[in-house]
């Protein structure tokens, strides 16, 4: 410590700041709180509620017991089941592509559109399944 102050006063190196404790980013071991607490019985953690590894349990333990208030408040619906089981659920089996009526004319060619523009007594039959739609 005395050498650091002498070097700074002489001005040979500019690496030291006003106090050697602040000289580097990582704290030096001798300035840490644990060094100061050496010899104290509980190391500043208290004698009664001792500093144990997992005092409330590891992870999500106690969700239905001693941590119930937290789970009910911040994670409602975390426990339990809802609905009916479906074994071998195929999600893409329920997809039904739909097309709106105003887009039906876009499924036929320009030639067909012009033909039925003149013939108003007849209506075209448009196969929407061919275009990949199942619902109109």
Image (tube, rainbow, N blue to C red):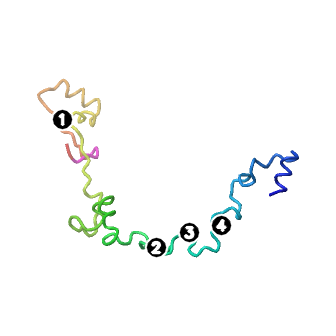
In the picture shown, does residue 12 fall above or below 61?
Answer: above
Q: Could you tell me if the residues under marks 1 and 4 are in contact, i.e. CB atoms within 8 Å?
A: no
- Which badge, 1 or 3, is on the more N-terminal residue? 3
Q: Nearer the viewer, residue 46 or 68?
A: 46
* Residue bearing the label numbered 1: 124
Tag 4: Cα neighbours inside 10 Å, few (<14), some, or many (≥20)? Answer: few
Residue 29 part of the magenta-drawn span: no
* Residue bearing the label numbered 3: 44
* Residue bearing the label numbered 4: 36
Q: Position of residue 103 (x, y in %)?
A: 25, 35
Q: Which mark is nearer the camera, 1 or 4?
A: 4
In the picture shown, does residue 123 fall above or below 61?
Answer: above
How far apart marks 2 and 4 lie (CA) works out to 21 Å
How far apart marks 2 and 1 lie (CA) works out to 83 Å
Residue beneath the point at 29% across and 30% down: 110
User: What span is colored magenta in the figure?
Assistant: 130-134
Q: Position of residue 136 (x, y in %)?
A: 19, 42
Tag 3: Cα neighbours inside 10 Å, few (<14), some, or many (≥20)? Answer: few
- Which badge, 2 or 1, is on the more N-terminal residue? 2
Magenta stretch prevailing secondary structure? loop
Q: Position of residue 102 (x, y in %)?
A: 22, 33
Quarter in which the N terminus is drawn:
bottom right
- Which badge, 3 or 4, is on the more N-terminal residue? 4
Residue beneath the point at 75% across and 54% down: 20
């Amino acid at each position: 410590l005395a050498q650091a102050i002498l070097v700074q006063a002489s001005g040979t190196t500019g690496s030291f700041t006003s106090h050697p404790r602040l000289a580097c980013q990582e704290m030096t071991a001798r300035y840490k709180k644990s060094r100061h607490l050496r010899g104290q019985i509980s190391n500043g953690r208290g004698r009664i509620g001792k500093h144990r590894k997992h005092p409330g349990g590891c992870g999500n333990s106690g969700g239905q017991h001693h941590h119930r208030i937290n789970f009910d408040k911040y994670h409602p619906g975390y426990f339990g089941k809802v609905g009916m089981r479906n074994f071998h659920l195929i999600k893409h089996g329920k997809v039904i592509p739909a097309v709106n009526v105003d887009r039906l004319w876009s499924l036929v060619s320009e030639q067909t559109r012009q033909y039925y523009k003149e013939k108003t007594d007849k209506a075209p039959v448009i196969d929407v399944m061919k275009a990949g739609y199942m619902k109109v």
